[in-house]
Image (cartoon, rainbow, N blue to C red):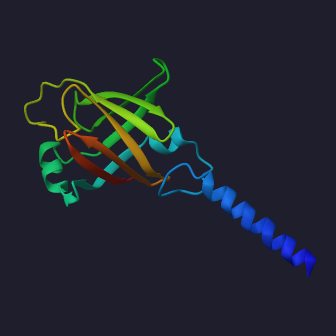
Amino acid sequence: MVAKKLLFFITIILLLATNSCQKYEDGPLISLRSKDKRLYNNWNVTSLKVDGVESIDEFNEKCLNTPIYFWFDKKEYKAYYGFEVSNHSGRLYAGGTAITLVMGDFDDSLFVGFGPFNRNIAVNWWIKRLTNDELWMECHFDYKHYEFKAIE
């Protein structure tokens, strides 16, 4: 009986300790891949809400309906992000549960940009979920709240 109670309390303590160490608000609880290996990928945007209103159609129209991708240049030791169209990339600065995306300038008049995905803007995004095949982020930009969801 005492052994069962002890095992029960140890289990509860381990569960609480594991939950308190969870890195991202919406998970995952445990991952065998590093944050970088999960983040550096091609992502198809499935939802982009602005102040709670779905705006994916406007985002796709202005950003040419292309996936966003993150990559790391080992030679320069710098991280980047961009869209799958030429000359639309910027720097990525990662740390903890946040990343900063800095879109560079672009000369293609077809690529208009959308909100925080625009010319010469640095935006801090908070990662809410980062799994092998899901990325959820949030930011505040221009007095609006953006919620970004993408899949691999």
Give residue 30's quadrant in the image. Answer: bottom right
Total labels: the figure holds 0
In percent of width and height, residue 44 lies at 31, 51
Q: Residue furthest right?
A: 2
- Pinpoint residue 24: horizontal percent, then vertical percent: 50, 51
From the viewer's perspective, is residue 1 above or below residue 62?
below
Viewer-nearest residue: 70 or 27:
27
In the picture, residue 2 is in which quadrant? bottom right
- The residue that appears at 21% across and 54% down in the rendered structure is 51
Give residue 56's position: percent from left, percent from top: 19, 55
Q: As rendered, which of 20 and 92 lies closer to the eye?
A: 20
Q: Quadrant of residue 94?
A: top left
Q: Is residue 28 left or right of residue 114?
A: right
Q: Is residue 76 above or below residue 125?
A: above
Q: Residue furthest bottom?
A: 1
Residue at image x 26%, y 49%? 146
Q: Indicate the position of residue 109 as horizontal and vertical percent values.
A: 7, 31
Q: Nearer the viewer, residue 88 or 26?
A: 26
Which residue corresponds to the image point at 58% horizontal and 42% vertical from the top-left? 34
Q: Quadrant of the N terminus?
A: bottom right
In screen coordinates, is 12 left or right of 44?
right
Horizontal side of residue 78 vs 18, given as left or right: left
| Name of the residue lying farthest toward the left | 109
